[in-house]
Amino acid sequence: MSGIDLFGLGIDGFGFGGAGGPFPDSVTYGFAFTGDTVTETQTTPHLTQTITFTQQTGNAALYQITAAVPFGAAFCAPFFSGNASVTYGFAGLGSAAVTETITTANETITLSYSAESGNASLYQISSETIVPGTTAGSVSYSFTESNGSVTGLTETVTRGSFSNSFALTITPTAVFTIGSGTISESFASAAGYDTLTFTSSGSGYVISSETANFISQGTATTALDINPFERAEFTISNGVVTAADWVGRNGTTGVVASNSHVSYNLLAPGYVQETVTYGSHSHFALFAEGSGGNGIYTEVASGSGSTVDLVGLQAQLAHLPAAVAALL
C-alpha cells in the first residue's frame, strides 16, 4: 500500500481467520456440514488442519470452535475452543461460493471462498475483508488533494500525549476515490489487489475496512506476483529491446548498464522479459506496460528458469480493476 504494509495499520493484518490465509493457490479448503456441525479442512503442500465448529444453543446462525488440529498453536490460539468472545457464521455451504464471518471483540473478518473449476469440493480464498470494531484508534491519516486527486498521504501515530507523523510513499498503482467523508484506495499487490477505505474521524481519517482480493493462478504455469516499485522503461526498435532504464519511486530514471548475463526479450507488445543467466541457472522477471500506455513497465512475475506462460499470466492480469491495470 502507500509505503507501509497491512500489518502496520493498528489493526490485524490478513492471516488466520477461521482457517484463512494469504496464499490462495497453495492452500485449498473443504467444508463438510451435518446437523449443527461444520468441519473446515485446510490443506497446504505440507500440512493439513481441521477445525470443527458447532452451532450455539441460543443462536443457530452462530458457531464456535469445539475442536481443532492446528499447524501453529501460538499463531492460531485466539481462535480455538474455549474463546467464547469469538463467533463464526457461514453462508453458502454446499454452493460454489462460501462465506465465513469471524466476529471478535475488536473486528469482523469476512472470508470469501470460491470453488475450484476442476474440483467443486475444494475451495480457494478469493477475498478477505477486515472491519475494525471501532474507528477510533492511535493511527490516523491525512490526505493532500489537488484538483480532486490525492497527491500525498501522511500517517500520524499517537501514544498518549505524543504524536509522530510520517509522509508515506504512494504506490504507483494506487487509485483513489474521494467520497463524502470517505476516501478509498485500491492498488495492485502481489497476487491480486487490495482496497482500503478511510473514513473521516476528527481532524483526520482512520481505516474503516481493508480488503485483500486474491487472483487465482488457475492452470497458468506462471503465477502473478506484482512488485509495483520494480519499474523500468525500455527502448524497442523493430521488436528488439535495445536499452533499459530503471524507474525510481519518485519517477527519476537511470540507465541499466549492459551485462553479458542479462538479456531482454519482447514477448508481445507491452511485455518484456528480463532473463539473468549464470552458468546453467537462469532467473526471469516479466515486466508489463500498463493499459494506460505511459511507457513505464512494472514487474508482474518472476521465477526460476527462462520460460514464461504469457497467456496464463495475461488471464490473471485481466482480473485487475481497469483503473489499477492502467497504472502498472
Image: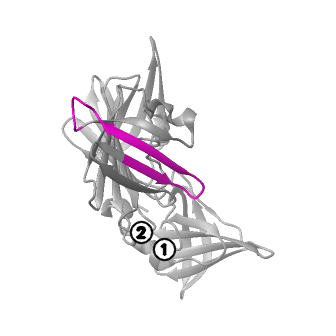
Q: Residues within 10 Å of mark 1 (few under 14, many from 20)?
A: some
Near-viewer residue (216 or 31): 31
Q: Note whether 315 is above or below 32 in the view shown.
A: below
Residue 307 lies, in percent from the top left, at 61, 78
Residue 17 lies, in percent from the top left, at 41, 41
The quarter of the displayed image where residue 65 is located: top left
- Answer whether labels 1 and 2 touch (C-beta < 8 Å): yes
Question: Which amino acid, by three-letter code, is at mark 2?
Answer: Gln
Report the mark closest to the observer, 1 or 2. Answer: 1
Q: Residue furthest toward the front?
A: 35
Q: Residue furthest toward the top?
A: 161
Near-viewer residue (164 or 280): 280
- Distance from disc 1 to disc 2, alpha carbons, whole Å, reads 8 Å
Q: Reply yes or no: does residue 256 show up in magenta.
A: no
**Disc 1 on helix, strand or loop?**
loop
Residue 94 circle label: none
Residue 316 circle label: 2
Quarter of the picture containing the C terminus is bottom left
Q: What residue is shown at x 42% (from left), y 67% (from top)? A: 290
Question: Which amino acid, by three-letter code, is at mark 1?
Answer: Ala
Q: Is residue 128 left or right of residue 232?
A: left
Q: Is residue 244 left or right of residue 101?
A: right
Near-viewer residue (253 or 38): 38
Q: Note whether 294 is above or below 86 in the view shown.
A: below
Q: Residue furthest toward the right?
A: 279
Q: In this picture, which residue range is highlighted in magenta? A: 39-61
Residue 220 circle label: 1
Residue 136 lies, in percent from the top left, at 32, 23
Q: Reply yes or no: does residue 46 show up in magenta.
A: yes
**Disc 2 on helix, strand or loop?**
helix
